[in-house]
Image: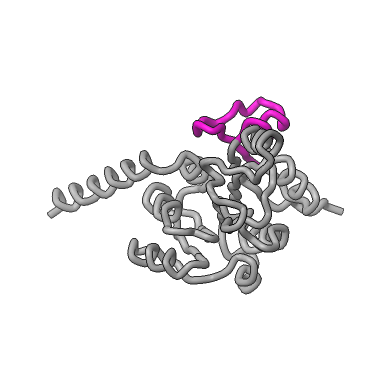
Amino acid sequence: MASVSRDIAANQVDRAHERAGNARVDLLFIAQMVEPGAKVLDVGCGDGELLRLLVETRGVDGRGIELSREGVNECVAKGLAVIQGDADTDLADYPDDAFDYVILSQTLQATRRPREVLEHMLRIGRHAVVSFPNFGHWQVRLQLLFLGHMPRTEILPYSWYDTPNVHHCTIKDFRQLCGEIGVKMERSVAFNAWGSPLRFSAPWWFWNLFGEQAVFLLSRRQAASR
């Protein structure tokens, strides 16, 4: 019986590693930012790919909210604890410090009030992890400059008339927002168009020009002692 249990556990570990190996590069970096066993809320969790990765590779106590009924059904079919909800309205209902990490992956630009969403994330979680496509990437700039139309790239595939994205931002924009609301940036990474991380020592303007997407680990700044 013990041998059978070990075989089952080994198979589960193998499947988790295989799934991790097939995951998007940004999701892998997000998973590395989350402490094992943490309590996590994934906001706008889509089909649950990231949440399942966190549960299987980091052993988190994971919850999720997702706007689309189809996404919720996919998550529930995978055994994930996900409810239907809207980041713009429903985060206000969560109590302070309810989670260790609140994650918003590739969803910030689709929210109606991104500043309020970010503030709620850092109210209900000790840390926030945010990833988003960088509208300052050189391919985006060139399409606007030379072709004169709203850009379409691999990470921004929608036409202007059917896109869910309503608040595009650049890496520079996001850093400025973090400064305005007093957010501490603990870790960050930007990826080029081929999914490779840019040099950590590179200046921010370099990330803003060549980073196709970025991931930030944030926390609240400690109040200054009197």
Q: Nearer the viewer, residue 85 or 156?
A: 156
Q: Position of residue 201 (x, y in %)?
A: 66, 25
Name the side, left or right, on which 125 lies relative to 63: right
Quadrant where the N terminus lies?
Answer: bottom left
Image height check: is 158 above or below 71? Answer: above
Residue 101 seen in the figure: no
Residue 13 on image: x %, y % = 29, 46
Residue 89 position, x and y percent, is 64, 71
Q: Is residue 152 above or below residue 99?
A: above
Spot occupied by residue 7 in the image (x, y as percentages of width and height): 18, 47
* The quadrant where residue 18 appears: top left
The image quarter containing residue 111 is bottom right
Q: Is residue 166 above or below residue 201?
A: below
Residue found at the far front of this picture = 147
Q: Based on the picture, tell me whether residue 192 belongs to the magenta stretch.
A: yes
Residue 205 or residue 168, whichever sits in front: 168
Residue at (53, 60) in percent of width and height: 44
Q: Residue at x 59, y 29 (%)?
A: 198
Question: Which quadrant: the C terminus?
Answer: bottom right
* Range shown magenta: 186-211
Q: Residue at x 23, y 45 (%)?
A: 10
- Say left or right for 141 vs 99: right
In this view, the residue farthest toward the bottom is 93
- Residue in the picture at 53% in, 43% down: 155
**Closer-to-camera residue (24/220):** 24
